[in-house]
Amino acid sequence: MNCKNNEELANLVEEARVYTKYGKLVDYIPALSRENKSDLSISIYNLNGEFFYAGDYLKKFTLQSISKVITLALVLMDKGESEVFSKVGMEPTGDPFNSIAKLESNRLNKPLNPMINAGALAVTNMIPGRNVEEKWNKLIHFVAELTNDNEVSCNQRVEKSEFETAFLNRALCYFMKQHKVIDGDVEELLSLYTKQCSIEMNCRDLARIGAVFANDGCDLETGKCIITKDIARVCKTFMVTCGMYNSSGEFAMKVGIPAKSGVSGGIMGAIPQKCGIGIFGPSLDQTGNSIAGLKLLEIMSKRYSWSIF
């Protein structure tokens, strides 16, 4: 069962919008603290080609941690699973996404998974290229392919704001460099990582990327297989186990779909063989997930029997 029309979807958005008042805007990235707290929008891209939307679905926002899934797919295709997972693990963590604690306690001193900041930094460090420019061009070309939009770019205001306040990420990088998880210049890595997190798009673009993952890596419109089926499976598995920060277990119980959130308020969903989902709602809960976006997905999962479990 799936959404039948935009009016039905709009009613669900208004039902979930009331929860925005219980959250708050992110405060440690100054450029993200200026959003409208009551915003909530969604796009759904069904694998039969149908497209539904509600709210200001063309409003742009930055990917933040959603970009971790995209970068992981890119690096897995270039480096292979063996090399990637020699630097980063596959296990969920109950700690905050920016925690250094597990790095210190893990005997291998490598990040537990690619969806926490330390793991994402290790993965970004593996993007092929001789310098930041080459690596960025490789990444943004891949994103343009996923969205079928050559104009996609990063928000320079957000990028600058994140780079200037990335003190904890710098600490994570230096710890990993000490233990040979990453190499190269830390400031260059942070420059690339903040560009990655500041990639900007709207709900429709995000739903389109979700649909590629839902369709085993193949683009519905072009017919091109952008990501291999096995790598799409690996990414969706990480989305289920680690995609919603340290609320991933609760999300799996209540919603039960592969999804990845970001502190901008974005959520990308990829329901295998059904649809891709893009959500934007900048009011966040305590773990950094869109509070109304989560409620909207919970309502829809129950109504449309979306859970993969």
Image (tube, rainbow, N blue to C red):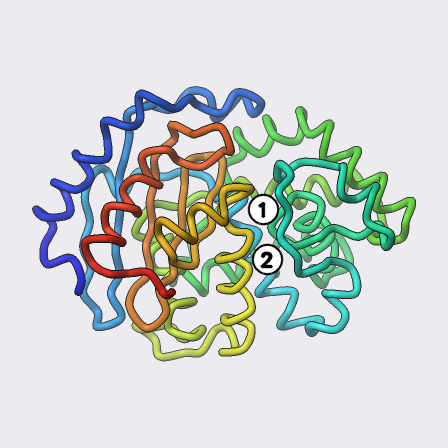
Q: Quadrant of residue 147?
A: bottom left
Quick one: label 2 or label 1, which is nearer the N terminus? 2
Q: Is residue 73 left or right of residue 275?
A: right
How many numbered badges does the structure rendering display? 2
Depth check: 286 or 48 in front?
286
Q: Is residue 36 left or right of residue 240?
A: left
Q: Quadrant of residue 173?
A: top right
Q: Is residue 181 left or right of residue 154?
A: right
Depth check: 209 or 102 in front?
102
Q: Helix, strand, or loop for circle 2?
A: helix
Q: Residue 212 at what x, y percent from top left? A: 40, 68
Picture disc at residue 71: 2
Picture disc at residue 196: 1
- Residue at mark 2 to residue at mark 1: CA–CA distance: 8 Å
- Contact check, label 2 and label 1, Cβ < 8 Å: yes
Q: Residue 135 at what x, y percent from top left? A: 67, 56
Badge 1 amino acid: Gln
Report the residue at 60% width, 56% height from top: 137
Badge 2 amino acid: Thr
Report the residue at 55% width, 42% height from top: 246
Quarter occupied by the N terminus: bottom left
Q: How would you rate the neighbour count of disc 2 (Cα within 10 Å): few for under 14, some for 14-19, many for 20 or more?
A: many
Report the residue at 70% width, 36% height from top: 99
Q: Residue 231 at what x, y percent from top left? A: 55, 72
